[in-house]
Amino acid sequence: MLDTLKQDWLGNVRGDLLAGLVVALALIPEAIAFSIIAGVDPKVGLYASFCIAVVIAFTGGRPGMISAATGAMALLMITLVKEHGLEYLLAATVLTGVLQILAGYLKLGSLMRFVSRSVVTGFVNALAILIFMAQLPELTGVTWHVYAMTAGGLGIIYLFPWLPVIGKLVPSPLVCILTLTAIALLLGLDIRTVGDMGELPDTLPVFLWPDVPLSLETLRIIFPYAAALAVVGLLESMMTATIIDDLTDTESDKNRECKGQGIANIGAGLMGGMAGCAMIGQSVINVKSGGRGRLSCFAAGMLLLVMVVFLDEWISRIPMAALVAVMIMVSIGTFSWDSLRNLKSHPLSSSIVMVSTVVVVVSTHNLALGVLVGVLLAALFFANKISRFMLVQSADAGDGHRVYTVIGQVFFATADGFTAAFDFKEALERVTIDVSGAHFWDITSVSALDKVVIKFRREGAVVEVIGMNAASATIVDRFGVHDKPDASDPLLAGH
């Protein structure tokens, strides 16, 4: 355990600190923007980003992943803030954390294994598009200087790493931010800066218990918002963790991440911040800037607070064009370009799931809804595919005896085909149904087996079911009626 702690915190000190600095600089305008979306003071988003990043560095299950205030969460807060005010938002944030901790102990993070690769790819592509779209307001109705600065920033980001020695030592996004800030100050360019986004706080956050009545009425107001925030926050965090797992070729503890996000959100709510979750954009910036350990997330949170409180005069002068260039780099790096090339070679069902996830997320800006649609489509396509692998073979054993051999999966999608495969009009004395090559999955399949057996018995045949595996036998014994005389007799009498 001690070796793991050393690796997570001290295994990549220089890379983690530099990456944390880049992330902190990129977090400032985003935290302010998300605060504006939610309808609260900029310091609410900044304090949240500081608190969540610092706490999750200790409690999270994915080293190298950045968590802070996010746009997906901010969109869910608008109505609550508008109708009930900031204090109720803080209370909802604390409750969000409690629900996420509960989800961690219920091991809901393990449900990520049911999310197909096509859904994850669609989620990644949709986020890349949304990140790019979020930069468009900064590139609309501006002077040519902004376009020149943004293009120059992209040039620095992509060309600087090619320089010998120094190109590998310093993250190119940091060089981009510092260089463009220096150019803007030296030339006195009249372009939009971080300071134009909103007023930066000048005090450290303090412990605040939400000033709301501790009553059932308060719970009735905040619970729907807290539940939605908990679901969206965990979903985005789990998806981001999966993506960072792939980028770093390491594994993460999804259930620990659920608990960690919950603890971080409770801390944010008690420090005057809004709820947040993992950020794919900032996480990608962190990884591409060399961040790998927990120190990078901790450094990002601490440096963010130090800069906005003590270095606000300098931070406010950073041109937005520099940060736009960094976020465009994130967008380009996040998008799975292989997925476009694979549209022709991958199965049509996988491509439909991926594209549907992208379309729903981009059109609604609702990550949870997009992933839900993708998961449902993937499940339907999978059920349809599995339903094709069910076969009932018939063989005449002589003397009015017929043997039916069932092969494949019997469940709700194949139940009708299973029933239709038997000939109930044939005059038989004995019927054997061999299910040694089949599996019965649900009560629909059990009901179909009951239907077949009882229909044959109504026609006067003796029916024997053989070869049933233990798992199928368990569900058939529990819900089936064909082997229970007291339950099947009324059905037989109905004839």
Image (spheres, rainbow, N blue to C red):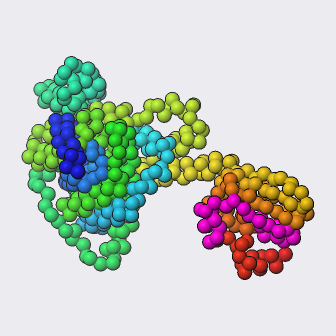
Give the residue drawn at x 56%, y 35%.
Answer: 346
Q: Where is residue 457 in the image (x, y as percent from the top left)?
A: 82, 70
Is 316 colored magenta in this rendering?
A: no
> Which quadrant of the view contains residue 148?
top left
Q: Looking at the rendering, which quadrant does residue 189 occupy?
A: top left
**Residue projecting furthest to the top:** 164
How many badges with numbers are in the image? 0
Q: Nearer the viewer, residue 347 or 442?
A: 442
Report if residue 463 lies within the magenta region.
yes
Q: Can residue 258 be seen in this view?
A: yes
Q: Along the line of sight, which residue is nearer the eye, 59 or 223?
A: 59
Left or right, residue 287 beside residue 464: left
Q: Is residue 273 left or right of residue 257?
A: left
Furthest residue in direction left, as rendered:
310
> Where in the figure is residue 374, as x and y percent of width and height?
51, 48
On screen, residue 291 above or below 41: above
Pinpoint residue 108: horizontal percent, then vertical percent: 41, 59
Residue in the picture at 69% in, 59% down: 467
Quadrant (top left, top right, bottom left, bottom right) of the C terminus? bottom right
Vertical arrangement, residue 202 with respect to residue 7, above or below: below
As drawn, 197 above or below 141? below
Identify the image quadrant of residue 203: bottom left
Q: Give the range drawn in magenta.
A: 452-478
Left or right: 97 in relation to 350: left
User: What residue is at 33 percent from the left and 38 percent from the top?
Assistant: 248
Q: In this view, does 397 lie above or below 159?
A: below
Residue 378 location (% of width, % of height):
55, 48
Front-lying residue, 430 or 324: 430
Q: Determine if residue 78 is in view.
A: no
